[in-house]
Image: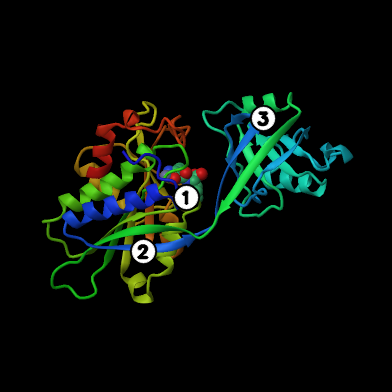
Amino acid sequence: TIGPRVTGTQAEKKSAAFIASQMKKSNLKVSTQTFSIPDRLEGTLTVRGSDISSRPAAGSAPTSGKGLTAPLYDAGLGLAGDFTEEAKGKIAVILRGGLTFYEKVKNAEDAGAAGVIIYNNADSLVPLTPNLSGNKTGIPVVGVKKEDGEKLLTEREATLKLKSIPNQTSQNVIGVRKPKGIKNPDIVYVTSHYDSVPEAPGANDNASGTSTVLELARMMKNIPTDKEIRFITFGAEEIGLVGSRYYVSKLSGQELKRSKANFNLDMVATSWENASRLYINTPDGSANLVWELSKNAAANIGKDVLALRKGGSSDHVPFHDAGIDSANFIWMEPGTESLEPWYHTPYDTIEHISKDRLKTAGQI
Ligand code: BES
Ligand code: ZN
């Protein structure tokens, strides 16, 4: 009932508290690790008094409190040559494609534009979120759907209001289970992220992985082990693996040496028919301990569903970068390696969850 768990929000914190309470029931030693995240942007785009659904780009400048009201300027693809003197002080409306988002904004800024709206070049369920590749811009930048961009080109002016929300934090929830009577045991990490993107309830991305982590902790509560198992759910994955990077950066040299494997679960329960293969994504595409163990486990339960693939984009990457064998588990379409159509949309709901796939991923 919490709904979207956007990084840095109260909803994300509420989720963290819920996860911690569940972990405690499984007799884990639970701690919450808080860290700061970049300022979050929030705002609106309006034309003649009505709202147009938009997404601010991370790294965009905010507007003044009363917003930026300015004429619109059709800047094509946003090439340097698309801007004339006319662009000065206006909000440039730019079509996606050709250049990177940042290059488009840079050209607009150099030409004296006061703001940028980038519209998608294909139909999408949600507005485009321009990715500025870690750059900051001096003017406000938002993304919109293709149809809304085309509509804007027929309008005279628009109002952009973006405010920056400072001093934000997110948190990782860590549940540790230590083996009895073993000194300096090997460490195995079972992880997921629990934050979601704005407007997406995040059932598959990634309540699926998070519920699997919690269920594994519960089922293994009374099963003896010679390993230290760390069940961790990360915050701030969706803004660039910020929680997992922070966690790994705080591991001591001794802990790193004991760390043997990271099983990361991200999108393990889609009901999208085509996503019939459970991919084991390793950041460099090569087989490692996680792949070998998973392959054996799948064979043991007679489930021929796994494939090894090169893939980052989730919290296994910082573990790999620290020299720990790691992989992400994710259902995708064989051949095309496509994700479900509901990915990062309001349609990522429990109706689109397959219990069967959730179970298979958890069993392996
Ligand atoms: N669960 C997704 C996507 C994903 C795709 C994970 C393929 C693993 C394999 C993840 O939460 C996500 O959206 N990641 C971002 C990148 C991240 C660094 C912000 C993405 O893929 O765009
Ligand atoms: Zn995810």
Residue placed under numbered mark 1 in the picture: 312
Camera sees residue 240: yes
- C-alpha span from label 2 to label 1: 24 Å
Closer to us: mark 2 or mark 3? 3
Quadrant of the image occupied by residue 325 = bottom left
Labelled pair 2, 3 in contact (Cβ < 8 Å):
no
Mark 1 crowd level (few <14, some 14–19, many ≥20, 10 Å Cα): some
Q: Is mark 1 within 8 Å of ligand 1?
A: yes
Camera sees residue 323: no
Relative to 65, does residue 200 appear above or below in the rendering?
above
Residue at disc 2, secondary structure = strand
Residue nearest the viewer, comparing 127 with 166: 166
Relative to 264, does residue 158 appear above or below in the rendering?
above
Nearest to N terminus: mark 2 or mark 3: 2
Q: Is mark 3 within 8 Å of ligand 1?
A: no
**Kind of residue sitting beneath label 2:** Gln
Report the residue at 63% width, 36% height from top: 45
Question: Relative to 211, is 121 on the left or the right?
Answer: right
Nearest to N terminus: mark 3 or mark 1: 3
Question: Relative to 363, is 33 on the left or the right?
Answer: right
- C-alpha span from label 2 to label 3: 42 Å
Quadrant of the image occupied by residue 122 = top right
Quadrant of the image occupied by residue 47 = top right
Residue placed under numbered mark 3 in the picture: 47
